[in-house]
Image (cartoon, helix red, strand yellow):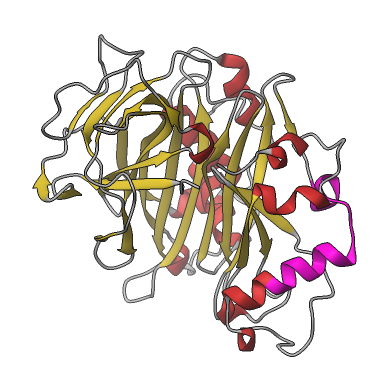
């Protein structure tokens, strides 16, 4: 059986084949803006905070940083191999990681088949184009070397891994199908507020993702009704929401300093909230957005939640699927999850290491070839263990799937 293969490319230092290559940079749209707000005593007097003249330390000086960048997801098709040429489908995900532009390439295991008609062109080095005349738009060609990121926190480093395709030439083109090119706009709002000189500043950080397809208003409005004009408008609306000045903003009006001060004054703690997503799986029926939500509102640490959001391409609606909607609840399934869990992690990471699981996972994610059960923080283990993910190939769960379930077809694939 062919494994799902992937390659990660970094902007100027690409571990690719046996030599370093130069990344052919793709335009990544970005937006950045910084402004300074000073709230005067007159502004404060307009609020209902019982301002007193001598309380001058309440004057706020706030620096606001707004940043956004666009990640891009492509569905590709093409060929790989020299003598034994294979036709394949692939996904390319181009994103910004710690200010490095990274391209993830994943070969879809279920798509690999022999090809006798198509021939590999003469390829000597990595070439990438985002505006190719030969394809729908995006093309990439080179010599395959599977690798993975081994350190994603301090410095991006790569480690080569074994693959039957290592050293083979490949050529991939953007597919001419619907949803072959999906963008994800990533927004970040950071506020640093200080009441007086010498006082520790207060930090607000808010990050979120918005998928969109150029020219597809219905799709875009499914995620964020207002995100149909400009990034700046989105920032303005989210600033209002963040400060509790509106629940559903349908229009943008300039915030008065009095309103901003009142909102900022109500929460005298550091605040960090992130709701980020990427595309985990896509076919002709669904798009699965895997997401992570993180919040910190004081205390020793924040809390994270891992889950997914499924988008039905036919109805153009989100599906609120739960574990019980997908699987037949049974002791056998729970035993299967427990067995793989104990094979995957050290059981001492759990609250009850010597006992079998007695509760199903609360959420899940999906990637190119796998269904991933997720126990979020504190469900079966302490905070230090983090979210616990148990990965299964689709076919491993076939006997436990509800036949009438919306995504039951995913589990019927026969391994090659």
Residue at the location (58% across, 77% down)?
345
Q: Main secondary structure of the magenta part?
A: helix
Q: Is residue 230 above or below residue 272?
A: above
Please give left or right for residue 383 compared with residue 261 in the image.
right
Asked if residue 328 lies in the magenta stretch, the reply is yes
Q: Is residue 320 above or below residue 77?
A: below
The percent coordinates of residue 266 (x first, y second) are 61, 61
Q: Magenta segment range?
A: 322-339
Is residue 254 something that shows in the picture? Answer: no
Relative to 114, say whether 371 is above or below. Answer: below
Q: Which is more toward the observer, 161 or 2?
A: 2
Question: How far across and how far down the image is residue 223, in percent?
Answer: 62, 31
Quick check: 159 left or right of 175?
Answer: left
Residue at image location 42% in from the left, 59% down from the top = 60
- The answer to which image quadrant residue 165 occupies is top left
Quarter of the image where one finds residue 264: bottom right
Residue extending farthest top: 133
Indicate whether residue 183 is drawn in magenta. no
Judging depth in this view, the residue of 385 and 212 nearest the camera is 385
Q: Position of residue 252 (x, y in %)?
A: 54, 27
Residue 8 visible in the displayed image = yes
User: In the image, what residue occupies the spot 76% across and 48% down?
Assistant: 398
The quadrant of the picture occupied by the C terminus is top right
| 354 left or right, relative to 39 | right
Residue 56 on image: x %, y %: 44, 66
């Amino acid at each position: 059986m062919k494994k799902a293969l992937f390659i990660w490319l970094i902007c100027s230092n690409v571990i690719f084949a046996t030599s370093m290559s130069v990344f052919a940079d793709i335009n990544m749209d970005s937006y950045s803006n910084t402004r300074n707000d000073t709230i005067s005593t007159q502004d404060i007097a307009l609020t209902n905070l019982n301002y007193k003249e001598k309380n001058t330390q309440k004057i706020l000086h706030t620096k606001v940083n707004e940043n956004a960048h666009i990640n891009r997801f492509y569905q590709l098709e093409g060929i790989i191999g020299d003598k034994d040429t294979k036709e394949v489908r692939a996904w390319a995900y181009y994103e910004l990681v710690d200010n490095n532009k990274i391209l993830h390439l994943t070969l879809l295991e279920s798509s690999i088949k022999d090809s006798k008609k198509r021939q590999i062109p003469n390829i000597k080095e990595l070439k990438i184009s985002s505006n190719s005349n030969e394809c729908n738009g995006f093309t990439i060609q080179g010599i395959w070397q599977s690798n993975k990121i081994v350190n994603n926190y301090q410095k991006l480093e790569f480690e080569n891994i074994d693959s039957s395709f290592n050293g083979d030439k490949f050529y991939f083109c953007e597919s001419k199908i619907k949803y072959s090119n999906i963008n994800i706009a990533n927004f970040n709002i950071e506020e640093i507020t200080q009441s007086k000189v010498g006082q520790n500043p207060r930090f607000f950080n808010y990050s979120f993702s918005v998928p969109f397809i150029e020219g597809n208003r219905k799709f875009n409005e499914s995620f964020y009704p207002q995100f149909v004009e400009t990034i700046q408008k989105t920032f303005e609306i989210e600033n209002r929401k963040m400060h509790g000045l509106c629940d559903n903003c349908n229009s943008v009006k300039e915030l008065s300093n009095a309103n901003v001060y009142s909102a900022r004054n109500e929460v005298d703690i550091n605040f960090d909230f992130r709701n980020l997503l990427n595309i985990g799986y896509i076919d002709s029926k669904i798009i699965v957005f895997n997401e992570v939500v993180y919040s910190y509102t004081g205390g020793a640490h924040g809390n994270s939640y891992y889950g997914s959001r499924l988008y039905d391409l036919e109805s153009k609606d989100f599906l609120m699927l739960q574990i019980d909607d997908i699987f037949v609840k049974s002791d056998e399934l729970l035993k299967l999850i427990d067995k793989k869990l104990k094979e995957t992690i050290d059981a001492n990471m759990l609250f009850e290491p010597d006992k079998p699981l007695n509760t199903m996972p609360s959420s899940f994610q999906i990637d190119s070839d796998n269904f991933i059960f997720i126990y979020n923080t504190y469900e079966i283990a302490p905070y230090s263990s983090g979210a616990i993910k148990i990965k299964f190939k689709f076919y491993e769960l076939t006997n436990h799937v509800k036949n009438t379930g919306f995504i039951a077809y995913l589990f019927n694939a026969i391994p090659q």
